[in-house]
Image (spheres, helix red, strand yellow):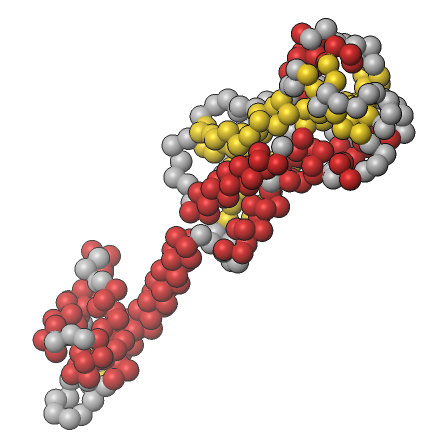
Amino acid sequence: MIGLMANVELRHLATMAAIAEEGSFGRAAGRLGYAQATVSQQIATLERAVGGPVFDRPGGPKPVRITPLGAIVLERGRDLLAKTEQLSEAIDRFKAGDGRIDIGTFQSVSNVILPSVVHQLRSEHPGCEIRLSEEEPEDPQIGDLDLLFYDGRVHGDVEYVKLLDDPYLLVTRPGDVPDGPIRLKRLDGKPMVAWPATCDQPRMERALERSGARPKIVFRTTGNETILSMVRAGMGYTLLPWLALHGADAWSDDRLHIHELRPSPSREIFLHWPARRTQSPLAIRAIQIAVEVANTLTKQM
């Protein structure tokens, strides 16, 4: 029976359903846009596949009648047609940008770049599902994620786009240091509040050392707001990237003063995705939006 059923096509079932609803081969042909001979051929093929007649044909003006075998075929056939329609609609939605996307992120991107990406995606594709995870491991892996933001290159089988260079700035209390750009070497021995030694932080601290500055780290924490609170309290200075300060709206805080650095260290922000994996339209659009947002932010720096 499986071999016989392999010859059944969805169009045969659709034709059978039309005949059952219209009561005649002729009216079904008109509804479907077929010649009546084509409808007859399709039903003949279906009957050979299932091993018996699906319609009794009384002839003349009398309507055709479904047979007991035909009733079973029609019931299951309609289920198949409905599921096929659902599949077709799901595929159309996917191609239009609906579906699910999993994005890995970190604090600064979560506060500044991702809100614009999420807002735009939801505006364009209200039915999409967006899942975010925020981690800052020393050795990030893209795993099952569709996209991964990171302040540096992620190694492995990935493709990427560089979004922007994010310069570090010195944050102090007003009056703690003179206005204007500050030479890195002036930070030697100064108390400093900093991120833990993960992600881009070690590279930034090595840049300080190369410039002859070894600040005294008095507190490490992952929270940007906590770092700025400690600066306000007089615990020490801090070096934070532009994105982190922009996300905290630090320029509007009169308890903080922000200085450019000379030379100016910066971190690189990248967006990664798995190599050799077919991307969904939603992921492709998310990359496009992220690049657009990053370009706009770069002009503000």
Q: In this rendering, is residue 247 above or below 87? A: above
Q: Position of residue 155 (x, y in %)?
A: 50, 22
In which quarter of the view is residue 214 placed?
Answer: top right
Q: Position of residue 133 (x, y in %)?
A: 62, 39
Q: Quadrant of the C terminus?
A: top right
Asked whether residue 265 appears in the rendered view, the answer is yes
Q: In this rendering, is residue 266 above or below 67? A: above
Q: Position of residue 104 (x, y in %)?
A: 58, 36
Tell which residue pokes out farthest to the bottom in this image: 61
Viewer-closest of 127 and 210? 210
Viewer-closest of 297 and 132? 297
Asked whether residue 138 appears in the rendered view, the answer is no
Q: Position of residue 297 (x, y in %)?
A: 59, 37
Q: Is residue 257 left or right of residue 7?
A: right
Q: Going 68% across and 16% down the picture, which residue do you hit?
A: 262
Viewer-closest of 127 and 250? 250
Q: Is residue 223 left or right of residue 297?
A: right
Q: In this rendering, is residue 95 above or below 82? A: above
Tell which residue pokes out farthest to the right in this image: 233
Q: Going 15% across and 93% down the picture, which residue do you hit?
A: 61
Q: Is residue 275 left or right of residue 127?
A: left
In which quarter of the view is residue 244 placed?
Answer: top right
Q: Quadrant of the N terminus?
A: bottom left
